[in-house]
Image: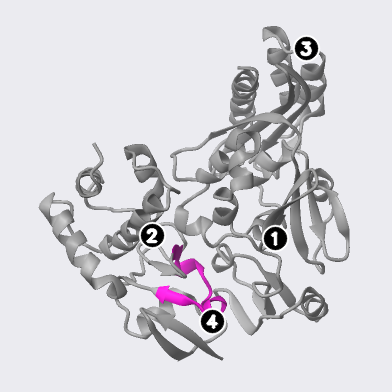
Amino acid sequence: MPLKILNYVRPSSLEQAYDLLQEDGAEILGGTTYARLSNRTIKLAIDLQNVGIGSIYEIGDYIVVGAMATLANMQFHDLIMEYADGYLYDVISYIWSVQLRNVATVGGTIVPKWGFSDFITALLALDTEVEFYKAGRMNLEDYLKGMMIKKDIMTALYIKKTPRKASFKFMRNSEYDFSIVNVAVSAVNQEGKFTNWRVAVGARPGVAALSYKAMEILNNSVDYESIEKAAKEMKNELKFSSDFRWSGEYRKEVAGTLLQRAVKEVIG
Amino acid sequence: MKINLKINGVWKEVEIDPSDYLLDVLRREGYLSVKKGCDTGTCGACTVLRDGYPILSCATLAATCDGHEITTAEGIADEMEDYAKMLAGEGAEQCGFCSPGLMVMLYALKKEIENGKVKKTKEDIRRYLIGNLCRCTGYAGQERAIFRYLGVE
């Protein structure tokens, strides 16, 4: 049985949307791109397009991306194209198709914690936070590690404009496909000295996670040996599993190689 | 429920079920250029423009389009005639099932190039059109035709 929606509503404020969400069987609609692949019944589908959380702007040290902004809105926004040499522009440009990116929303991609997501892995390698209407702001990592927040509304993504240099690598069976494993790496670039490394690995096939061991090694030194060691430690630290696409063992080996390539790209 | 769609420049009130996808609503309303291919958001045969931007109508709930402007291949008939000649001139059409979706994308691509959002290079054009699958041509003819049409060396 395909997805069945019994009632559809388009509230005009966050407060109204939140109240509606508390009803039994109510759910927020994201971009609806993957809704078609589910077979559940939604008693009340809440569309957030009129509640005013679709803008992208700057506040202090942060780029704020409204949860209802589409991936395409984000990709082509000047703030995103400028930050970290257009790192996020590049990452988004490899996500599925133009048509999908014009529909898929930032909130609809982050909130479900999709394991296959390139977007989440790429964000996790930056200094990012997510904001919910009631739960407030939290680190993206804390959100990904925590329980699913079901009866709240993600309102925005915050990207701190730390002067990072970043690299994103993926492996796919073909370019127009989901990543089978992906790695994002970034470091603060202080006049050619790289510090404060972040290493995120996703599509394991679980949702992206940071490798603290790899980050610790790279924070101590970044030479040929330490890059190899960081890859090795990451493979021991993170869990890789098998699915119908690839085995966990193969994913792990490829992730190690991608990590090394990404670090080398960052340091130039 | 009733929704209002501005389809190819004309406002229409349409009766839908909240679970209906835009693709099925458009075909029901007679816009048969919008093709039902994979029906899973992959092949691009169902591509239409919403407020000027290409979307997958098979992956977009019709209800979310209430109050928006939808353009199908029927709405850009003049351009379609040019595009059809361009594809035929390079032997780039076989069954033709994917052509309306591809042509709607080409229409959007031209605007994005004019706006400076997409560079007029072979690589950028290929990446823009990656979501339009064709099971017949192997893409070589389509690429050749589109590159020539856009004046890309």
Q: Which residue is mark 4?
A: B66
Residue A82: x, y in percent? 61, 39
Q: Distance of mark 2 from mark 4, alpha carbons?
A: 22 Å
Q: Give the quarter of the image for residue B12.
A: bottom left
Q: Tell me: B20 left or right of B139.
A: right
The chain that hosts pointer 4 is B
Q: Which residue is mark 3?
A: A221
Residue B69: x, y in percent? 45, 76
Identity of the residue furthest to the right in this view = A135
Q: Amino acid at mark 2?
A: Gly
Q: Distance of mark 2 from mark 1, alpha carbons?
A: 25 Å
Span colored in magenta: B53-70
Q: Distance of mark 3 from mark 1, alpha carbons?
A: 37 Å
Which residue is located at x 60 percent, y 33 percent?
Answer: A85
Residue B127: x, y in percent? 40, 44
Q: Distance of mark 4 from mark 3, alpha carbons?
A: 56 Å
Label at residue B44: 2
Q: Which residue is mark 1?
A: A67
Residue A188: x, y in percent? 75, 26
- Dot 1 alpha-carbon crowd within 10 angstroms: few under 14, some 14 to 19, many 20 or more: many
Q: Distance of mark 3 from mark 2, alpha carbons?
A: 47 Å
